[in-house]
Image (cartoon, coloured by chain):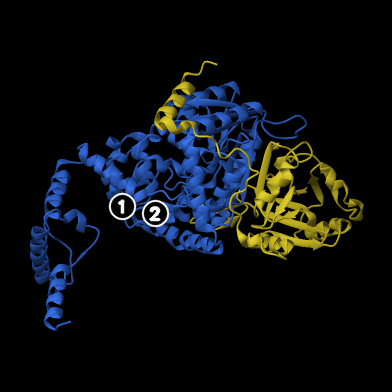
Chain colours: A yellow, B blue
């Protein structure tokens, strides 16, 4: 590897740091979390209620259903309420196959990544983080990342069991039993629909990403 | 980007003449100011998290070589590429080479201050590649041909009427009517930019952080433009500076808790995306090529000097949002990419004090910048250090240095100082008490051009204090 600039930069850093550049690294893994805010840590906390409260604060709309078989009707009702088309693009996520979509026969699905013409996307979520009403999306062959950004309306189906307290809890889920974390190509924390304040600092929704973010939570 | 920091004083004069600027800048104080305080108060651990964030960054900087090596190894293991660039010229050239390798005609861009620092847009244009800014604020100033005036709200100095005029003029090819409401202007920009993402050959974004543990680059945005920029084109280029690296996911999570709260008063920004390498087997979307262009541009040298603290900066903008000087003159007066208190320290470190020695004077040392800085950067202290350097290196005009010397002579001789200040207070007090304030005084025409000097009451604090002590002693207390 012939990289004169790389060598020059590292030589510069080392000469600036002097002798203390060889101190042992304290931080190598996320197993040790830093300070966790108390907001989600007190006993008997209702994470689902907190998640909903925080998500609504950032202008998500939230629907609650008792079980997965009620999800299709809830989505159909949302589409009708907002006068949205029933042609949907849905992530080819196996977990979404557990939902009995035939319960809402008017819905038509394409299972793929997003295209510019798509108006409504349906995805699941890897975890829902109560601390700030944040959805954690990971990408892979079944969960294309563009579905989170391109369509005007994003509907996210959340299994109540996937609601966790903090970002750290969500990272631990992703880490699983492995020693080292296997990072998906993208991990996206989504907190509300797209917005901007670039014109006179007036908050305006729907800048480039979804104008609406609707969350359907199933289960208790 | 070409700097005009050396004509700071003239820039300020121009800025103070601009009528709408103060109205526009005051919005920062009335909107983001209270929002930041509210977000801070909703999180009792906020101060403790700031202390921790500072410690994480200090530790990282003290071991920067090791963390950068770890980061690079992780990026490579995921199929990404890291390009080390010592200077802006090298970084521009590297990015151009990568664009040419992708046979690029147009590139979409997410917001990146490093891209501004290296003057990327002009360079790409000069080489027949069209850069398209997609962040709304950056899009606006690109159309206007202006530099950003704020690091997170680049068009904050403009009114909606300014933007409406600009859009009407520049959007004629799209046959759009002149519209004025923010909602309508946002919609117009959205409509125009949508097809550009998919049509671009390369997407360039900055990075708020790079993670050594995983080799990920992170962008924190509200609009979603950065994500469309980095996921739709075939090639994604991340342009970032060395000090953006943090050790672990846990560490970045801690810093993220203070970033949005400090920047906009949000609990969390809308989108925080961790990108790790190019598209994987079976993926239905994402870039096929993932490159990171890492810029030094003087930072490795800063690491060894008195300004290392500045490398903790996470570009939240809280210091400028809370700065009375920035709030009066706006960002353009600072003459380069970085503005406000953080710019007053960073700019001289990056482009040389010689060309920016007036910037550290743009402070009343009220201390608000340090108070609101989530990374605990002692900005007033660093500005004072730069003032000292400018004085000892004789960078300031002779008149200023002469005045400083007179001041020093007085300030180190208390008796003389008191006698003189008492005399001045008496004279000014006698001649000004009727009017209450002075609009003109000899030798202070410039200072009084934009404000009045309240007339002194005629006595100094010291003389009042002496008298009081005497009276108390006489009363036998």
Residue marked by disc 2: B369
Residue drawn 16% across and 72% down?
B465
Which residue has dot 1 on it?
A: B363
**Image location (x, y in percent) of residue B422:** 10, 65
| Front one among A121 and A93 | A93
Q: Quadrant of residue A174?
A: top right
The quarter in which the N terminus of chain A is drawn is top right
Q: Residues within 10 Å of mark 2 (few under 14, many from 20)?
A: many
Disc 1 and disc 2 in contact, CB within 8 angstroms: yes
Residue B434 lies left or right of residue B245; in this view the side is left
Q: Chain of mark 2?
A: B
**Circle 1 marks a residue in which chain?**
B
Residue plotted at (11% across, 55% down): B413
In percent of width and height, residue B92 lies at 47, 27
Most extreme residue toward the bottom is B475
Question: Residue at image x 56%, y 41%?
Answer: B134
Choose between B102 and A23: the one closer to the eye. Answer: A23
Q: Tag 2 or tag 1, which sits nearer the N-term?
A: 1
Q: If the image is split into quadrants, where does the C terminus of chain A sit?
A: bottom right
Give percent across and percent down for residue B319: 41, 52
């Amino acid at each position: 590897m012939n990289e004169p600039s790389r060598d020059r930069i590292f030589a510069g850093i080392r000469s600036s740091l002097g002798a203390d550049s060889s101190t042992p690294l304290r931080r190598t893994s996320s197993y040790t979390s830093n300070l966790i805010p108390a907001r989600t840590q007190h006993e008997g906390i209702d994470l689902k209620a907190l998640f909903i409260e925080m998500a609504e604060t950032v202008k998500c709309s939230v629907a609650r259903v008792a079980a997965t078989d009620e999800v299709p009707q809830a989505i159909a009702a949302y589409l009708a309420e907002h006068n949205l088309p029933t042609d949907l693009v849905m992530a080819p996520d196996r977990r979404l196959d557990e939902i009995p979509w035939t319960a809402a026969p008017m819905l038509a699905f394409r299972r793929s990544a997003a295209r510019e013409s798509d108006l409504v996307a349906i995805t699941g979520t890897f975890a829902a983080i109560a601390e700030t009403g944040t959805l954690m999306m990971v990408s892979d062959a079944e969960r294309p990342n563009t579905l989170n950004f391109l369509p005007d309306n994003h509907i996210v189906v959340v299994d109540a069991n996937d609601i966790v307290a903090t970002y750290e809890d969500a990272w631990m889920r992703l880490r699983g039993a492995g020693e080292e974390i296997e990072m998906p190509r993208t991990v996206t924390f989504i907190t509300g629909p797209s917005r901007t304040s670039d014109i006179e600092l007036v908050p305006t929704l729907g800048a480039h990403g979804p104008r609406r973010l609707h969350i359907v939570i199933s289960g208790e | 980007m070409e700097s005009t920091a050396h004509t700071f004083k003239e820039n300020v004069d121009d800025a103070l003449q601009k009528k709408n600027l103060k109205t526009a800048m005051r919005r920062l104080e009335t909107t983001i100011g209270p929002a930041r305080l509210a977000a801070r108060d909703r999180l009792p651990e906020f101060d403790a998290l700031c202390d921790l964030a500072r410690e994480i960054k200090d530790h990282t900087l003290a071991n920067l070589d090791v963390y950068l090596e770890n980061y690079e190894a992780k990026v490579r293991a995921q199929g990404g590429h890291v390009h080390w660039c010592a200077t802006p010229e090298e970084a521009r050239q590297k990015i151009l080479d990568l664009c040419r390798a992708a046979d690029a005609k147009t590139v979409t861009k997410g917001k990146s201050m490093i891209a501004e620092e290296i003057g990327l847009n002009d360079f790409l244009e000069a080489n027949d590649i069209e850069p398209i800014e997609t962040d709304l604020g950056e899009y606006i100033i690109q159309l206007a041909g202006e530099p950003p005036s704020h690091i997170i709200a680049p068009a904050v100095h403009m009114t909606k009427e300014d933007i409406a005029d600009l859009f009407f003029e520049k959007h004629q090819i799209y046959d759009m009517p002149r519209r004025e409401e923010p909602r309508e202007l946002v919609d117009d920009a959205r409509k125009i930019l949508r097809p550009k993402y998919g049509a671009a050959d390369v997407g360039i974004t900055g990075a708020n952080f790079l993670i050594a543990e995983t080799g990920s680059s992170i962008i924190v945005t509200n609009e979603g433009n950065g994500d469309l920029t980095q996921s739709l084109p075939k090639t994604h280029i991340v342009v970032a500076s060395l000090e953006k690296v943090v050790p672990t996911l846990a560490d970045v999570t801690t810093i993220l808790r203070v970033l949005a709260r400090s920047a906009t008063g949000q609990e969390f920004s809308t989108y925080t995306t961790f990108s790790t390498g190019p598209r994987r087997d079976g993926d239905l979307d994402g870039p096929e090529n993932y490159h990171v262009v890492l810029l030094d541009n003087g930072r490795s040298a800063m690491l060894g000097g008195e300004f290392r603290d500045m490398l903790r900066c996470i570009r939240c903008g809280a210091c400028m949002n809370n700065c009375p000087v920035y709030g009066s003159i706006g960002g353009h007066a600072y003459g380069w990419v970085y503005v406000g208190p953080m710019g007053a320290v960073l700019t001289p470190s990056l482009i040389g004090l010689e060309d920016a020695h007036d910037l550290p004077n743009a402070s009343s040392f009220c201390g608000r910048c340090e108070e609101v800085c989530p990374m605990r950067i002692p900005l007033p202290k660093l500005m004072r250090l730069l003032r000292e350097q400018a004085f000892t290196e004789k960078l300031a005009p002779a008149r200023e240095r002469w005045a400083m010397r007179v001041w020093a002579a007085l300030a180190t001789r208390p008796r003389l100082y008191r006698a003189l200040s008492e005399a001045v207070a008496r004279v000014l007090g006698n001649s000004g008490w009727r009017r209450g304030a002075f609009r003109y005084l000899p030798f202070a025409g410039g200072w009084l051009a934009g404000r009045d000097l309240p007339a002194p009451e005629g006595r100094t604090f010291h003389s009042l204090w002496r008298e009081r002590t005497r009276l108390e002693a006489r009363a036998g207390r």
